[in-house]
Image (tube, rainbow, N blue to C red):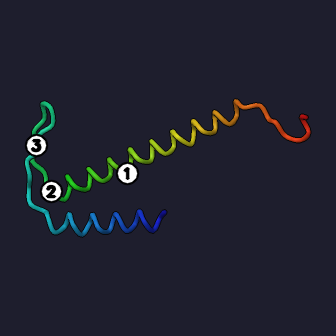
Amino acid sequence: MIALLLSIVALVTIFSVQNAAPVAVSFLFWRFEASLAIVIFLSVLTGILIAVIYSLSGKYRHSVKKQKQPETGPANK
Protein backbone atom coordinates (compact mmCIF):
# COMPACT_ATOMS: atom_id res chain seq x y z
CA MET A 1 0.00 0.00 0.00
CA ILE A 2 2.80 2.40 0.89
CA ALA A 3 4.69 1.49 -2.28
CA LEU A 4 1.60 2.27 -4.38
CA LEU A 5 1.12 5.59 -2.61
CA LEU A 6 4.78 6.54 -3.10
CA SER A 7 4.58 5.57 -6.78
CA ILE A 8 1.53 7.77 -7.31
CA VAL A 9 3.17 10.68 -5.51
CA ALA A 10 6.33 10.29 -7.61
CA LEU A 11 4.36 10.21 -10.87
CA VAL A 12 2.28 13.24 -9.90
CA THR A 13 5.44 15.11 -8.89
CA ILE A 14 7.15 14.40 -12.21
CA PHE A 15 4.02 15.33 -14.16
CA SER A 16 3.44 18.53 -12.22
CA VAL A 17 7.06 19.71 -12.51
CA GLN A 18 6.90 19.27 -16.27
CA ASN A 19 3.62 21.26 -16.36
CA ALA A 20 4.44 24.28 -14.20
CA ALA A 21 2.70 26.94 -16.33
CA PRO A 22 0.28 29.29 -14.56
CA VAL A 23 -3.41 28.51 -15.04
CA ALA A 24 -6.62 30.30 -14.11
CA VAL A 25 -8.87 28.33 -11.78
CA SER A 26 -12.55 29.21 -11.36
CA PHE A 27 -14.78 27.65 -8.75
CA LEU A 28 -18.19 29.09 -7.93
CA PHE A 29 -17.46 32.72 -7.03
CA TRP A 30 -13.69 32.34 -6.72
CA ARG A 31 -11.19 32.87 -9.48
CA PHE A 32 -7.43 32.73 -9.03
CA GLU A 33 -4.26 31.92 -10.89
CA ALA A 34 -1.86 29.27 -9.69
CA SER A 35 0.83 27.03 -11.05
CA LEU A 36 -0.53 23.94 -12.77
CA ALA A 37 1.79 21.91 -10.55
CA ILE A 38 0.07 23.25 -7.43
CA VAL A 39 -3.40 22.66 -8.88
CA ILE A 40 -2.53 19.07 -9.80
CA PHE A 41 -0.93 18.40 -6.42
CA LEU A 42 -3.89 19.79 -4.49
CA SER A 43 -6.32 17.81 -6.66
CA VAL A 44 -4.49 14.54 -6.03
CA LEU A 45 -4.18 15.33 -2.33
CA THR A 46 -7.92 16.00 -2.14
CA GLY A 47 -8.64 12.70 -3.91
CA ILE A 48 -6.42 10.79 -1.52
CA LEU A 49 -8.07 12.46 1.46
CA ILE A 50 -11.55 11.58 0.18
CA ALA A 51 -10.48 7.96 -0.41
CA VAL A 52 -9.02 7.67 3.11
CA ILE A 53 -12.16 9.14 4.69
CA TYR A 54 -14.38 6.79 2.65
CA SER A 55 -12.23 3.78 3.59
CA LEU A 56 -12.19 4.65 7.29
CA SER A 57 -15.95 5.23 7.36
CA GLY A 58 -16.49 1.79 5.81
CA LYS A 59 -14.26 0.17 8.41
CA TYR A 60 -16.06 2.06 11.18
CA ARG A 61 -19.49 0.97 9.92
CA HIS A 62 -18.27 -2.62 9.67
CA SER A 63 -16.94 -2.59 13.25
CA VAL A 64 -20.17 -1.05 14.61
CA LYS A 65 -22.25 -3.63 12.74
CA LYS A 66 -20.05 -6.42 14.06
CA GLN A 67 -20.42 -5.18 17.66
CA LYS A 68 -24.24 -5.10 17.41
CA GLN A 69 -24.51 -8.75 16.32
CA PRO A 70 -24.92 -11.22 19.20
CA GLU A 71 -22.24 -13.82 19.49
CA THR A 72 -23.35 -17.25 18.30
CA GLY A 73 -20.48 -19.51 19.15
CA PRO A 74 -20.41 -23.17 20.26
CA ALA A 75 -20.60 -22.16 23.94
CA ASN A 76 -23.92 -20.35 23.46
CA LYS A 77 -25.81 -23.32 21.96
Gap in angstroms between the C-alphas marked 1 and 3: 23 Å
Of discs 1 and 2, which sits in the foreground?
Answer: 1
Mark 1 crowd level (few <14, some 14–19, many ≥20, 10 Å Cα): few
For the point 52% across and 40% down, the residue is 58
Gap in angstroms between the C-alphas marked 2 and 3: 12 Å
Gap in angstroms between the C-alphas marked 1 and 2: 18 Å
Residue 72 appears at what percent x and percent y? 82, 36
Q: Quadrant of the C terminus?
A: top right
Q: Secondary structure at mark 2?
A: helix
Q: Are marks 1 and 3 in contact (CB under 8 Å)?
A: no
User: Residue beneath label 1, please?
Assistant: 48
Q: Is residue 64 left or right of residue 46?
A: right
For the point 60% across and 39% down, the residue is 62
User: Residue beneath label 2, please?
Assistant: 36
For the point 68% across and 37% down, the residue is 66
Instruction: Tell me the number on the disc at residue 32.
Output: 3
In which quarter of the view is residue 19 placed?
bottom left
